[in-house]
Amino acid sequence: MRDLEKYRGIIPAFYACYEDDGSVSAERTQALTQHLIDKNVKGVYVCGSSGECIYQSKEERKLILENVMKIAKGKITVIAHVACNNTADSQELAAHAESLGVDAIASIPPIYFHLPDHAIAQYWNDISSAAPNTDFIIYNIPQLAGVALSIPLYKEMLKNPNVIGVKNSSMPVQDIQMFKDVKGDDSVVFNGPDEQFISGRLIGADGGIGGTYAVMPELFLAADEALKAGNIARAKEIQYKIDRIIYAMCSCHGNLYAVMKEILKMNGLNIGGVRKPLASIIPEDMPQIEKCREMISTAIA
Ligand code: HMN
């Protein structure tokens, strides 16, 4: 029987960690991994959107995963997003991830060309065949990938025994029910949009993978605990605080990831900035970033 429990919980989307010169930092990658383990998260989702994977080479992505695994292996669940813009490169990353012993690999559909379902299925099955002993999670993020996971395509993918579920980042929360209804508790469906974490969990998500978890894991862990304890009022209260923080962080000139990295830096964990063309923070952002940091610490207290 497959162990799906290891996926049911709070799984921060891991941030790209750079040196001050912009190169990938092995040391800072390890430090962020340890930081998140210390916060008691269930796992990490490496090299996804928040990991800036689309701006990195295969070699950089391998280096990042290797350094996460050095610290995380055997301690928390590690899911490696391996999709590249072509099948062969994705397969190379999938095989590499399996060789390191990750718990699961994940992949968005091919981007730019809107391919038919049978071509998308082929792409995912080809990737999965390069990591035959590793769970596979479909990453549905239609607003960025340009294609949405349909139920017929999901059912087709479930014929592959490695496919265990969906990380769902589409905005309609009922999509979670739609995917969950296909295979129930023999599958895992993750909530993607952090702003609807509680709604997603209520309608059936097993856990969440989110881009803002790493900057405020305490809040997502507390919201999840409140939900599990049946304290909906408390869960909603925390979700409201989370959403106000996200809206405040999104109001800067700098990209959201740049803002969150700056907050981590203020808290003593320097993982560098963001890679171009993502916008870096500017001096005028600092009062707002300071305010966001304050909002987070007040909410946690
Ligand atoms: C990832 O792949 O890094 C993220 O888990 C994707 C995730 O769904 C995030 N969406 C995007 O980055 C588009 C959200 O967590 C998002 O960061 C959050 O809801 C704030 O808007």
Image (spheres, helix red, strand yellow):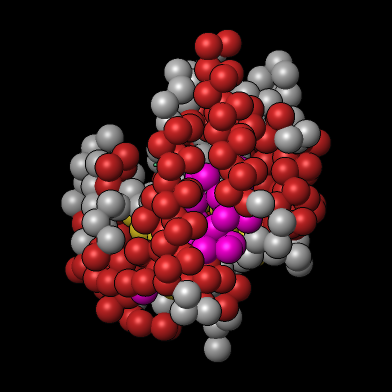
Q: Is residue 90 above or below residue 105?
A: above
Q: Can residue 230 be seen in this view?
A: yes
Q: How many labels does the image show?
A: 0
Q: Is residue 199 left or right of residue 190?
A: left
Which residues make up the magenta segment?
204-223
Residue 40, horizontal then vertical, whole percent: 70, 62
Q: Residue at x 66, y 52 (%)?
A: 301
On the rendered image, what quadrant is the N terminus found in?
A: bottom right
The residue depicted at 42 percent of the width and 71 percent of the height is: 232
Q: Does the magenta stretch include residue 209?
A: yes
Q: Quadrant of residue 29?
A: top right
Magenta stretch holds residue 230: no
Residue 275 falls left or right of residue 118: right
Percent position (x, y) of residue 253?
A: 45, 18
Give how far across and how far down residue 240 sits, in percent: 42, 52
Q: In this view, does 34 lie above or below 286?
A: below
At horizontal 63% and vertical 55% (from top left) the residue drawn is: 218
Give the vertical position of 132 relative to 271 (above or below). below
Front one among 113 and 270: 270
Residue lying at 77% horizontally and 44% vertically, measured from the top left: 30
Q: State left or right for residue 102 relative to residue 27.
A: left
Residue 94 drawn above or below residue 259: below
In the picture as drawn, the residue positioned furthest to the bottom comes out as 1
Which is nearer the eye, 65 or 123? 65
